[in-house]
Amino acid sequence: MTVEIGYALFSATLYAAAAFLLFVLPVLYGLVSGAAKSGFVTAAGVAAALAFAARTAEVLWRSGRRAPEPDHGTTEE
């Protein structure tokens, strides 16, 4: 289960970074200014948080729905 949690957090971080950059790139290129700039930065933060939470939940939900693996370490005779 630890591997799934690590994968979920890693991939969620990448998704959040991509979502943040999607919204903040117009600000970085100087295409928006003034009040719109703070709106874009706020939207970038919200989008990043939502992307992180959604991706984490998706990966952990999917890994939790798999069939449990049989325990081959013990034998009953």
Image (cartoon, rainbow, N blue to C red):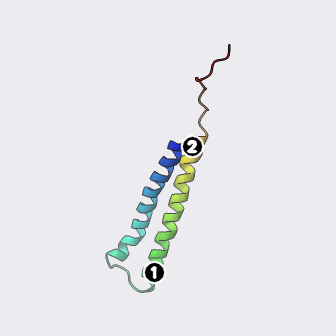
Please report the residue visible at 34 percent of the width from the left and 78 percent of the height from the top. 31
Q: Which residue appears at 57% of the width and 47% of the height?
A: 60
Quarter of the view holding residue 23: bottom left
Q: Residue at x 58, y 24 (%)?
A: 73
Give the mark nearest the N terminus, 2 or 1: 1
Which type of secondary structure does the marked residue at label 1 adopt? helix
Residue 21: x and y, percent?
A: 39, 66
Circle 2 is placed at which residue position?
62
- Name the foreground residue: 74 vs 35: 74
Q: Horizontally, is 26 left or right of 35 in the view?
A: left
Q: Position of residue 30 (x, y in %)?
A: 32, 79
* Total residue callouts: 2
Looking at this view, is 5 or 67 the one in front? 5
Question: Residue extending furthest right?
Answer: 77
Q: Is residue 27 above or below residue 58?
A: below
Looking at the picture, which amino acid does disc 1 mark?
Answer: Ser
Q: Which dot marks residue 38? A: 1
Instruction: State the quadrant of the N terminus.
Output: top right
| Residue at point 46%, 61% (across, down) | 16
The relative height of residue 44 versus residue 11 in the rendered view (above or below) is below
Q: Secondary structure at mark 2?
A: helix
Q: Residue furthest top?
A: 77
Q: Tell me how far mark 2 sits from mark 1, CA to CA.
A: 36 Å
Quarter of the image for residue 29 reads bottom left
**Quarter that holds the C terminus:** top right
Q: Residues within 10 Å of mark 2 (few under 14, many from 20)?
A: few
In the rendered structure, which amino acid carries the disc numbered 2?
Answer: Arg
- Horizontal side of residue 29 vs 38, given as left or right: left
Residue 40 location (% of width, % of height): 45, 76
